[in-house]
Image (cartoon, rainbow, N blue to C red):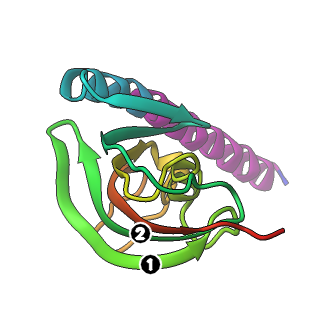
Amino acid sequence: MVKRLFLIISIAVLAVSCESEYQTTLVDQESFIDKYITSQFADNTVIRNEGVNRVIIKEGNGQTIEKGDQVSFYYAGYVLTAQGPSTIFTTDRTTVTIGKGDLIKGLDIGLVGARSGEESLLIFTADYGYGRNSVNIVPEASALLFQTVVTHVQKNKN
């Protein structure tokens, strides 16, 4: 009985410790992202939306993206490290409905407010990316940077 209780307490302490470590990582990432944006993109417009930073590289002039809109865009994803964006881990062109959950949270939130024709960088902590999971060559708990170009916005008719 004592051994079992000790095991349960040990597991609980380990779980709390891991959660605390992850939360510290997220706070460190937020601080690093703010410094990175300030130092590299001081002259660009930066939109902060629910934890996602959108750095506008080239303004768009078409329809503005809202939840429920169907959007076509190109993207390239990078792991963001202390040295800046590292190895590219994905490139693609896709068409999705925003807010439906077909994208990772950082893209789904970050594209809201962008306009057709806009080129931007979406930068966010692991919490808005793959979280504690490692995916392909992306290590667990990684901050991410996505270079995006919105090519078309089809407004939701509802």
What is the C-alpha distance between the residues marked 2 and 1? 6 Å
* Side of 100 where 93 appears, left or right: left
Query: Regarding mark 1 in the picture, which secondary structure is present there?
Result: strand
Residue placed most toward the observer, 78 or 95: 95
Assign the C terminus to one quadrant of the image.
bottom right
Residue type for callout 1: Thr
Q: Residues within 10 Å of mark 2 (few under 14, many from 20)?
A: many
Residue drawn at x 49%, y 60% is 130
* Side of 156 where 77 appears, left or right: left
x%, y% of residue 112? 58, 50
**Image quadrant in which you'd find residue 148:** bottom left
Assign the N terminus to one quadrant of the image.
bottom right
x%, y% of residue 50? 62, 37
**In the image, residue 5 lies in the stretch drawn in magenta:** yes
**Image quadrant in which you'd find residue 134:** bottom left
x%, y% of residue 139? 33, 60
Q: In this picture, which residue range is highlighted in magenta?
A: 2-28
Residue drawn at x 69%, y 57% is 67
Residue drawn at x 55%, y 56% is 63
Residue placed most toward the observer, 3 or 84: 84
First of labels 2, 1 by sequence position: 2
Image: 40 above or below 19: above
What numbered label is drawn on residue 148?
Answer: none
- The residue carrying mark 1 is 94
Question: Is there a contact, CB below 8 Å, between mark 2 and mark 1?
Answer: yes
- The residue carrying mark 2 is 73
**In the image, residue 3 lies in the stretch drawn in magenta:** yes
Q: Residues within 10 Å of mark 1 (few under 14, many from 20)?
A: few
Residue type for callout 2: Phe
Q: How many marks?
A: 2
